[in-house]
Amino acid sequence: MLGFLRLQDTCLGMPIDTARFQAMLKEMKEIYDKDPVGAVRGKSFIKILDAYCLYELSRLGIKPEADMTIGTGEKGHKKTKVIMKQEVTIFGSHRPKDIDVCVYSSESGALLAVSTRSQMSSVGKNIINYYEGIIGDVISLHQRSPCLVIGEIYLLPTAPIKLKDGKVMKEKIDYNAIARLFKNITNRSSSDAPPDKYEQFAFLVVDFSKPQPELIDLGSKYEDLKIDDFFDKLLETYNERNPFLRLGT
């Protein structure tokens, strides 16, 4: 059974800024409550999560724009400009892909990417299609750029709604079954590993019915899907693969 995770009770040693995280969830709720359809279709809802990702990566020392040196040693240094921003289009093996938050180099292209997605209604009906889609995306990106470090954050509400004829229709969702799916496509260990996994995957199940939305604890079986150290692990994986162009502090 899913249980509530009180971030304020577990903040000791947690890498993420829990106060900022809670403020983000509350802002998402306020925007969604005002106009559910417009918030999702206009992407104002998910863009709040994108901005939070940018903030957390900045906390780890990645600057919006920085001139950096490639390589080590006294001679042969080469300069590159490293940029972090929202809404960047990068190439996959078959088509371009819009990335929500991306760190890229003027010399090497995309280095680290974070994609975000939310489903606020018709979860059971559409989850498999979305699941296949996010696997297709990561395969395409890794086939073209095997060293690219990619994270995915997937958000679902505890009470999905579907607005139809002015009525709110609820649906029962097996969140543990969905977590099992997502657990299969996280923790890509190396650049020569199969391309069908993300380096890190965070699954957020949120109760938006309360004034202050609450994150649901998926249990110890799904530690790999928690947001707690999602950003730290992404950066750690990147730096392990790229000793000549390290990011962060």
Image: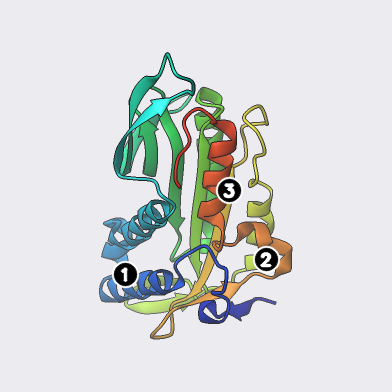
Q: Are marks 2 and 1 in contact (CB under 8 Å)?
A: no
Structural distance between the alpha carbons of marks 1 and 3: 29 Å
Q: Residues within 10 Å of mark 2 (few under 14, many from 20)?
A: some
Does residue 132 appear anywhere in the picture? no
What is the number of the mark on residue 176?
2
Q: Is residue 213 above or below residue 36?
A: below
Q: Position of residue 220 (x, y in %)?
A: 72, 68
Mark 3 or 2: the one toward you: 3
In the displayed structure, does residue 60 sit left or right of residue 132?
left
Q: Find residue 200 and name its label.
A: 3
Q: Is residue 71 above or below residue 83?
A: above
Q: Residue at label 1?
A: 36
Q: Residue at x 73, y 64 (%)?
A: 221
Q: Residue placed at 34% from the left, 23% from the top? A: 79
Q: Residue 84 appears at what percent x and percent y? A: 34, 42
Q: Between disc 3 and disc 2, whose residue precedes?
A: 2
Toward the front, the furthest residue is 74
Q: Amino acid at mark 1?
A: Pro
Q: Secondary structure at mark 3?
A: strand
